[in-house]
Amino acid sequence: MVNLEWFRTFKAIYETGSLTGAAEALYVSQPGVSLHLSSLEAHVGFKLFDRTSRKLVPTERGKILYNYIQEPIVKLQEAEAHFHKSTEKDIPTISIGMCFETFQFTLEPYLPSLSFNVIISFGEYPEMLKGLDNGVLDLIITPQKGDYKGLQYKPFFKEKILLVSGSKTNIKPLQQILKTKDWAKAEEWLKQQKWYGTTGDMEHLRKFWYVNFGKRPDFKPNYIVPNMSSILRCISNNSGFAVIPDFLSRKEIADNKIKLVWEGHSVLENTLYFGTRSKTMYQNEISQVEEIFQKEMVL
């Protein structure tokens, strides 16, 4: 009989595009992810992904399998979250949705000190909003607002989206171009450089490019890695460009491991919100989490 964990691992690989990304999303080892995939492929009798140098690309049969199992797996995860809550009456459990980097840079170090249980979920913001509305999530950290009537949003931080580079990158030619305000020439110069991007979210790069150059970027990053933490590790004391929020990169900038290259001629900012339901039985626990974010994200 097939192991249901194989399907959950397959779904994570499909959505992140790599074994490393799936391992980080599921909090398991990469060899474990690889074993699950090979076991599932052996069970179904055909290859689910084509291996390329940059990512795992689903085969046609892999796409068909994903369409079959995606919704049932999500339903099972929702059931798991509800069941977890219902079986632990003495210790409250709250479910929080946010992006991986936000969790890693803010809440992760505090988890052992909390007096209540926490389930962390990563995903796209529309999915988080839906999960908050239907009760699967109790709090989300989001730059987007939905139109759900029972939800409320409290702004707590504005992040700047920055163009950064590794400390060994020669940015003098760009600095000279920027002084002339020749944005078209700056765009062409930047397009010739080595770029880093993330597997799941290129929104920051797209917005930065549109705000400053009036168009979407017509190139793909040279290196696609699982998340922004990976980008920072790759370019620290090295070379290459990326577009990253200021609060994620401020330590590396302060330590001179990466350079703040440009804020743009039009500064791009996102307001981050605490999203909650209007009525919740976990207000005390949510307030504690909100205090941690406000403390950690103050510049």
Image (cartoon, rainbow, N blue to C red):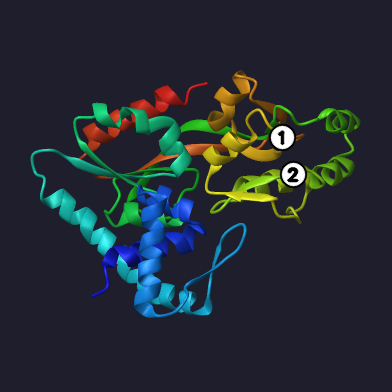
Position of residue 138 measured from the top left corner of the image (x, y, whole percent): 29, 45
Position of residue 214 measured from the top left corner of the image (x, y, whole percent): 78, 49
Instruction: Estimate how packed mark 2 is, as few (under 14), some (14 to 19) or many (20 or more) residues with alpha carbons within 10 Å.
Output: some
Left or right: 239, with 289 as reference point: right
| Three-letter amino acid code at the position of disc 2 | Lys
Q: Dot 2 lies on which element? A: loop
Position of residue 164 measured from the top left corner of the image (x, y, whole percent): 68, 33
Left or right: 204, with 281 as reference point: right
| Three-letter amino acid code at the position of disc 1 | Ser
Position of residue 130 measured from the top left corner of the image (x, y, whole percent): 37, 57
Q: Are marks 2 and 1 in contact (CB under 8 Å)?
A: yes
Q: Nearer the viewer, residue 194 or 213?
A: 194
Instruction: Estimate how packed mark 1 is, as few (under 14), some (14 to 19) or many (20 or more) residues with alpha carbons within 10 Å.
Output: some
Label ID, residue 239: 1
Q: Dot 1 lies on which element? A: loop
Residue wearing tag 2: 194
Q: Nearer the viewer, residue 67 or 21?
A: 21
